[in-house]
Amino acid sequence: MKFFVDTALIDEIVELNDTGMLDGVTTNPSLIAKSGRDFKQVIAEICKIIAGPVSAEVAATDFAGMVAEGEVLAKIADNVVIKVPLTYDGLKACRHFTGAGIKTNVTLCFSANQALLAAKVGATYISPFIGRLDDTNIDGMELIADIRTIYDNYGFATQILAASIRGANHVSDAALSGADVATIPPGVLRKLYDHPLTDKGLAAFVKDWASTGQSIL
Ligand code: G3P
């Protein structure tokens, strides 16, 4: 499973990239607003840090506007992925970019039918929002599993990018459900390695090692 980090904060991306765990980055207008920085500048900086895919979302909601904006964003770097919303115009824009050889991420997906349409227009990634579905009492993970089944039934190459991840369990559950990628907020990524039994076990090893009086170096 590939790991993308869901943030527009450069410091976080640099730090997490150093661990070798990162395969890419996703951003959205809310994350750009939170960064307080210039959108295109931030995307250019991220693309210099990360060799993998970097999702940059269009702001327009009409087909012509999405195409015009996406073409500007795609020129920033070769690894930019154009993120479009799962609307009628967004799907048309996705088809346009796919036809032009530009990678796409279709976002704000909340149903299996929406995911089916994204695959039909050749999306590189489909982003089902797990957490936001859970918020409405619908099991977001079931959607991931349904999309996996549908894509496998027909051999669609679109990659399932589990988004709106809120906790560590979402990551392992998305992996079990067959997601190709998880885009994870930095705080959740750091929680993936935490386990109280690891901490307890390590404390015991450190204490017992000290009692031997030995040194490896
Ligand atoms: O990038 C889209 C997605 O991950 C947003 O997550 O927590 O705002 O629902 P959230």
Image (cartoon, rainbow, N blue to C red):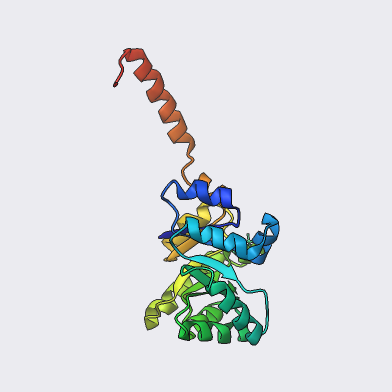
At horizontal 63% and vertical 86% (from top left) the residue drawn is: 63
**Considering the image in quadrants, where does the N terminus appear?**
bottom left
**Considering the image in quadrants, where does the C terminus appear?**
top left
At horizontal 54% and vertical 67% (from top left) the residue drawn is: 55
Q: Identify whether 32 is placed above or below 70.
A: above
| Total numbered badges shown on the rendered structure | 0
Quarter of the displayed picture in which ligand 1 can be seen: bottom right
At horizontal 47% and vertical 67% (from top left) the residue drawn is: 79
Q: Nearer the viewer, residue 200 or 41?
A: 41
Q: Is residue 137 visible?
A: no
Q: Position of residue 192 (x, y in %)?
A: 48, 47
154 left or right of 160 in image? left
Q: Identify whether 145 is placed above or below 195.
A: below
Q: Identify whether 101 is placed above or below 14.
A: below
Q: Position of residue 26 (x, y in %)?
A: 55, 63
Q: Nearer the viewer, residue 141 or 210?
A: 210
Q: Nearer the viewer, residue 192 or 135?
A: 192
214 left or right of 175 in image? left
Q: Position of residue 139 (x, y in %)?
A: 57, 66
Q: Position of residue 16 (x, y in %)?
A: 49, 48
Q: Nearer the viewer, residue 135 or 107?
A: 107
Q: Is residue 24 visible?
A: yes
